[in-house]
Amino acid sequence: MSKRDKFRVVGKPRARIDGLSKTTGQTRFADDITLPRMLHCKLLRSHVPHAEILDLDVSRAEAMAGVHLILTGEDFPVTYGILPVSQDERALCKNKVRFVGDPVAAVIAVDEDTAERAARSIDVRYRPLTTVSDPVKALSQDAARLHDYGEEGNIHRRLAYSFGDVDESLADSAHVFEDVFFYQGNTHLALEQHAAVAAADPEGRVTLWSSTQCPHYVHRALSKALELPTTQIRVIACPNGGGFGGKTDVFNHEIVVTKAALRCGRPVKICLTREEVFYCHRGRHPVLMKIRTGVSADGKLTGMHLQTLLDGGAYGSYGVASTFYTGALQPVTYHLPRYRFDACRVFTNKPPCGPKRGHGTPQPRFGQEIQLDKIAEKLNKDPAELRLDIVEQPDTLTANYLKIGTIGLAECIKRVVARSKWQDKHRKLPFGRGVGIACGAYLSGAGHAIYWNKMPHSGVQLKLDRSGSVTVFCGSTDIGQGSNDVLAVIVAEVLGICPDNVRTVTGDTALTPVDLGSYSSRVTLMTGNAAIQAAERARDLLAKAVAEQLEVPGETLLFADGCVFDPADPDSGVSFEQAVVAAESRFGTLGTVGSYAPPRPEARFKGGGVGPSPAYSYSAAVVDVEVDPETGMIIVNRVYIAHDIGRALNPVSVEGQVVGGVYMGLGEALMEEQVFRRMPPKLSDALVHRCPSMLDYKSLSSLDMPEVIVELVENPDPNGPFGAKEVGQGPLLPIMPAVANAVYDAVGVRIDEVPITPEKILKGLDQKARGGEGRVGPADFPDIQWPEPYFVPPPWEGGDGQSTNDPEQKRAATMHKMDRTTAS
Amino acid sequence: MNDAAGSVLQEAPEQPLLFMLNGEQQRVWVSARNTLTEVLRERLGLTGTKHGCELGECGACTVLLDGNPVLSCLLLAVECEGRSVETVEGMMQGAKLHPLQSAFAELGGTQCGYCTSGVLLTAKALLERQPAATRGQIREALSGNLCRCTGYQQIFESVEEVIRHMQGKPAEPGSAS
């Protein structure tokens, strides 16, 4: 860490180093790349949701002028998948299609139109299989199986954990609250459609430029799927035109164009249409959940039993991790003495779900925060006060063995309560107006890579030379969140130079050291710490050389404002450029490295690898709404949000992430949904996406967006670079439940599912007018055959992080093997 | 595009299009079915104009046609004959940034940058029409430009910063912030 207590760059609002490239249209996204002799690729996608491929005839397409190559499933014998436990995808389907949009063939032609026409003239004969559309029905064993792996039938994965005896706690509790919630799926809708360009060189190596958030994982997957050594492959992540998790997976089109470039000896490009992006999906899992919570007479939580059922769609994707995440983070906000968590993910014939901003955690957070509102009402307590009384303490090990360092949640709650004048509004506004409060927490990076290894999660190389220029090399990928600027800010702060004098080279597997990718809110913390280490090593070299020159001790030298000097005698200092010259003269060519790996988690039980993080961020929000009881229309007047950021490295970027998270949360709360319908039987009866276009998939426009009041709580976390924690995902979490709670405050109806639409509000009001409870949401949670839970006594019950029952004896050997890989 | 065996040769013949592009005369061969987005990006290499939805919903492809914002993905290039088109590449005057360009960078009006070109051009047209636009008018004007990153707030603030500067010191482009 810096020896100075006063920052010169960190914490100062500034334009990002790449801001002007963006406002002048010069940022080069993947689809902006054009190479000489470039060919174009189009995919033929299945129009049936579940079928065997009987025959695939490409002869008409092959004969068309301008067609260079046609690829089918036969060309891709090796399966892949982002998680080692779910290697269930093929670049092109071979025997079977599993959802409308699954690709079966690729045409590479002189231009897009020719490729498109040729793709349409490929004849595919399908033998339809029963479509599995409903996650509850997917639990039944007689439905047609999508995959021949997983637990049984269409159950991809089941989990059960018991951190102490929750049933006992609930039996002893003054109150037990039981609620069922449903969180509808939705998608990222990044404005940039996925695009990729591949080009082979005469030596047989191939380069892929892609709109990916995770070039390192794409690199590994290409090697596996194409059976090529990693040394022959270079992946360059272009700046992403928005990601939100939607570009973290490895996509079939990336593998297809890479193969095609090698086969054609010419560059090959693909840019997906918006409709195809809806089929790529990997978005928010629809989750049905049941929460049973024990509460003491004075409003303390005594235990919680959470059950979740995830509609996974047609492939594994990140789904096993998503399944863990529906339960992992519940205990990090409020003190929970005991916790039981069961989760189940099923396959259905829809585009695969995966990680979207908040990855698996917004769904149970929605349920828990609404339930707390119900608890407060029943106990006649203020919901903000109730939360303040149960906020988890700093430096705590939770019931499920997550190590919390700093926690600014209480401060967040106090700030939004004060700013929103909560006390004057809650339960006090006229009918039709209301306020709701909710909180959330998120990881600052996952504790493990998606594949087991002991190497750093992030690496940085720093190059300095006699010109005084500094270049940072890092595998991280700027998806619009500003990660390049984070590198520049940190290096500039340590070396005492201006961030604009730092160049960044990022996201290139040939040039940059490995960073795992832009997911799990890991980048600021992990690349930041790696950058600090590299920069401090460079600073030490410079200090040593300058100290010899000035004949002063190196430790006294200050690096600031482009100079290196002894604060006791500032006039005798040298410029930064002179300092580099001195060091290069003294030590030869200069270069330093830094790396970061998270601390070892405390959990020792299988599956305990999902949830640990070096630091957790916290948010609290108050949403102020108006609901028209005649039309059910909801107008969000204002959102007050406080976020525990640790330290804001660049407040402009941080505020942008907070407001952007609020925006996306409001979309999920009010309108965004990835939903499906059956075609009429006389057409095909196929299960199709209801709205695979931006016209029908509704999102908030500038007219819908309310004013957002942002409060940043800065309490530096010892694990964060200069104390910084994440901000990209956490601020979304409290928004959906805060809207639901505000709607209840306004018109007295509980909408226990998202999206919260005018129709549902009217339904609730109507129900209430007829003497009903005025609740809209799922009625019940299905019976699921849960496995014997791993029993892990919480730390305060003598636990050491291991499960006390021996799972090896109780579970089949194959399951055991899967668990080992999943935990990593 | 130049492959001799390509089916492009069987298509309807192309025709010359003459129009003003970013203040300069531009001649280009186009097919009658080419959209302006295609011609700008693929024929002329001006990739600052983006595409996001193919149906006129997202606003990423916004350019100015005779000073008015239009969706270039819904506009046939041939409709631009003799008219004046401005793209993000034309916003700078020489090496001088338009005040909106510096304000958006300074104040977080751009994150991933994909919607930015369209937003900037819409805002530019707004300020020419209503140099003292209120937040309500800014919201209204930008309602056809979707942004998935910012939640719009820093976009509004960036535009308002330029308005403040224009009111205070009218002739100072490039110093918006």
Image (cartoon, rainbow, N blue to C red):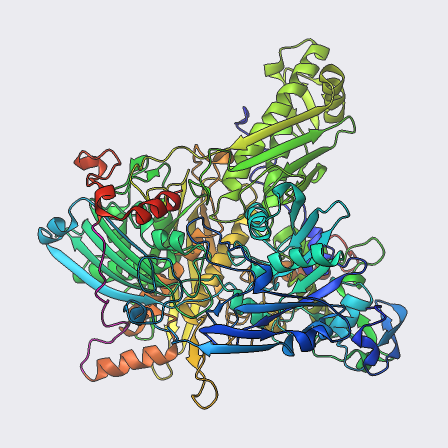
User: Magenta segment, which residues?
Assistant: A771-788
- Give the farthest residue toward the bottom: A682
Residue A121 image-quadrant placement? bottom right
Q: Is residue A322 left or right of residue A429?
A: right
Provide residue A361's location: percent of width, then percent of height: 37, 55
Residue A802 counted in the magenta span: no
Q: Residue at x 49, y 54 (%)?
A: A81
Residue B127 vertical position relative to residue A628 in the rendered view, above or below: above
Q: Nearer the viewer, residue A725 or A211?
A: A211
A382 vs A57, left or right, is left
Res A203 → quadrant? top right
Q: Position of residue A547 (x, y in %)?
A: 67, 13
**Magenta region, main secondary structure:** loop
Question: Which residue is at the front of the view, A99 or B86?
Answer: A99
Question: Is the C terminus of chain A in the top left, top right, bottom left or bottom right quadrant?
Answer: top left
Residue A4 relative to residue A588: left or right: left
